Image (cartoon, grey):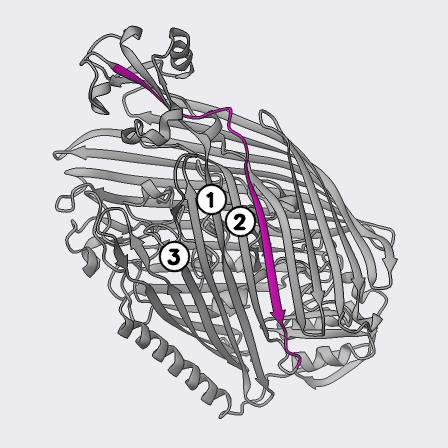
Amino acid sequence: MNLQRFKQCIHISTLALTAFSSIAYAEKPADRKNIYDIANQDLSSALRQVGKQSGREIIAPSEALDGKIAPTLQGTFSADEAIKFLLRGSGLVAEFRDDIVLIRGRETPSGEVASRQTENDTAIIVTGSRIRGASIASPVTVRTRRDMQEAGQYSFGDVIRSIPQNFNGGQGPTIASGAENFGSSNVNSGTALNLRGLGQDATLTLVNGKRLAYNSIRQAVDITEIPIAAVERLEIVADGASALYGSDAVGGVANVILRKDYDGLTTTARFGVATEGGYVQKQLTAVAGQTWANGGFIVTGDLANSGAILARQRAYTQGFDGSYTLYPDMQYRGAVLSGHQQISSNITANFDALYSVRRSNDMQYPLDPETSATFYGYLNKQRTRSYTLSPGLAFTIGADWKASVNGIYGNELSSGYSEFYLDGEQNYASISRFKNSTKVVEVGAEGPLMTLPAGAIGLAAGGGYRRLDLDQLTQTVGFAPTISLASQDSYAVYGELFVPLVSQSMDIEGFNSLSFSGAVRHEKYNGLKTVTTPKAGVVYAPIDGIELKASWGKSFKTPALFQLFRDQPAVLAPMSLLTTGYPASANFLYLYGGNRSLRPEKATTWTTTAKWSPKFLEGSYLEISYFHIAYRDRVAEPFRLSQAFLPEYAEYITYAPTNAEMNAAIARSAAGLINYSDAAFDPAQVVALIDDRYVNATSQTIQGIDGSFQLHFARTDYGSIDLTGSVTYLRSRQKLAPGQDAVPLAGTIYRPPHWRANMGAVWRNGDLALGTFFNYIGSVKDNISTPILQVDDQATVDFTATYAIPKDGTALGNIEASLAISNFLNDAPARLRPYSFGVAPYDSVNQSPLGRTISLTIAKHW
């Protein structure tokens, strides 16, 4: 994208912001009010009635409401006015944010309650800490369901692609051919978080704080299996978190919080289309629920179809055969059930269940740009089915302690069918199947140890058992299948401590608050070394409104099961394929595949953060963080076969191998010796044994800066405006072998760009909300071949409008309509030089082929 185009995007965004501001401060429709008649009763019940009647979501810790009585509320009020009235004299304060209201004590740091469920949820979930009320030393990003909908995002793929700390690489439906050699591909049209670009297997994704089954052969979770309508919010801690959550949380942890309580039925229909062709979207969603005095449930069903995008529908791929698939045709079916029931005064049962099926059909990938896939190329079909069952019990012990027991069973099955064509005839067909299952039992307890002048010292402790299973089948049609079964058991114990040293009430100059936190986790895996990971943090506020944070910790990721237990083929081939100077009869023995001697990958992370929350602008903040990650022992295949005899890979070559070494290598191969030489196997003719199995070879250094802000302007008569923004600068370097120099990753093609940003403005007034959003993906260098070229950046502008018709007793009442236009300027991906036949002529990892899309959504609340 050239400078003129960039300026045009900024100009349009600025005009939209100006228009929103002029609307907000010119019109004077009153905020919608309701008639309330709530008798004098306990505060939690009164707040629940206000929430149900107004539609406002009210979040408060149960211990803050215990024993408090609300006054009688009669008359016509807005929801915020009613809440403020009920809190009079309670010692509690309300913080009004977008679609939620956070209630906290006057000495509770702002934002802590935002990580919690509703007040009747005894299993309070806190991302970044297991202790209620603990100040979290790592920055936390929160996207509520309303944030997503107002941004025109109706799947988690759209949501996470808009988060600057996340890299779009790994696996995803928009990734076309050419990225496979750089760690990215469309495995099964699923999408997983990839914080800091460390790999989707280095980000831990949870649902209500619980693990799900992995997706395909990658040790990652497909977040798009969860329907947005079932979600309350997404919380992301882009900081090492293995001390709290165990393996995979190197880049950070994402926690999807499901909606807990709902009364009634809401049905939603959505239709969207890409203006250049393809990508026709159809989506139907239903949310139903019921609450009663001591329990409730909510169920969500989601049906969605999206059409394919083909090369003939985009100008920048006109040189390719028109059938080339840029985005697959997909069908998705998903459902979520969540419920809770109080069994006794101190025991509550809860249950979460998730189910999804996704199909991707008729994907065609020609290997020659000028021919069809049925002449020379591949045809693919994919199907994924997953489900998770998670029952649990939550206990209240005494007045302050909480305990829980949770079980998890997750199962994910990915299957694919591929046909390869050569000269117009089917050369072969292959089948693949990957079945992952996860079984988890966890126990934990949390509560205060003792009370200091600044507050209670909090302790959380617990442990658990986890079993992973991978059933892998690959088969070329007409030949015997290759079947691989792998499993892994692990046991863990953890402890976390939070110590408040200074609070505002102590009135110490220069110390508004000061607290320390520490955590440690010890895990033992069968076949692997035990791993102990600590983490420490400090949060210091010199004055009210300014907060300084720092965290340090160690994190780890266990090798994926396929990296450990994948077959280890032994291939015999002539030396003349790789090098010269040897007799024609000389051969090499080549090994690749799994390695049961792998060690866990380990990282040391530290983050510093400064946050300013001005009191004169309630609900606003400015935050900036610096992060540094030293990641070592990364698992990789150390080289390509063509590079085997380069000097830096000498440690992987054994010259003149012994018979015992060769026999041991052949014995590990399920198929025995695979002979591609011109003669029968003769050990005397094997001059080199090349070991290219997975090893702990790679090290990476990742560092950068995150910045975010929110400005909230509100006037009773003119509505409110929220300006939000997030920007990330990332640098990363990788060393593949001890003898190599570190090479850059970030800022190169198919890798994370140095710069990413997302900014938005939303004006709300009564039942109307208008939004504009600016998304930026920085340029990268095409360093695959010489000369090195610059690949232009991509900037897009989105617009959204939402209008809710109040409940009025007519058929049109209680209807909400939303219009979204994404990539308004239709900014196309920058063209690049394909490095091989059949490679898409743009960086499909970083830049999307969707183009301008328009969608209309209608929701009816029954």
The correct choice, above or below, for 336 with respect to 20 in the image is above
Viewer-side label of 2, 3? 2
User: Within the magenta stretch, is there residue 21?
Assistant: no
**Residues packed near mark 3 inside 10 Å, few (<14), some (14 to 19) or many (20 plus):** many
SS at mark 3 in the image: loop
SS at mark 1 in the image: strand
Looking at the image, residue 695 sits to the left or right of residue 93; the answer is: left
x, y percent for residue 312: 18, 55
Q: Earlier in the sequence, mark 2 or mark 1?
A: 2
Per the image, the residue denoted by label 2 is: 629
At label 2, which amino acid type do we have? Answer: Ile
Q: Is residue 344 visible?
A: no
Residue drawn at (19%, 41%), measured in percent from left and top? 367
Viewer-side label of 3, 1? 1
x, y percent for residue 438: 57, 36
- In space, the residues marked 2 and 1 are separated at their CA atoms by 8 Å
- In space, the residues marked 2 and 3 are separated at their CA atoms by 17 Å
Looking at the image, residue 485 sits to the left or right of residue 295; the answer is: left
Query: Which mark is on residue 753?
Result: 3
At label 1, which amino acid type do we have? Answer: Gln
User: Viewer-proximal residue, 81 or 459?
Assistant: 459
Question: Quick check: marks 2 and 1 in contact, CB under 8 Å?
Answer: yes
User: Within the magenta stretch, is there residue 611?
Assistant: yes
Question: Quick check: marks 2 and 3 in contact, CB under 8 Å?
Answer: no
x, y percent for residue 92: 78, 73
The residue segment tinted magenta is 587-615
x, y percent for residue 215: 47, 40
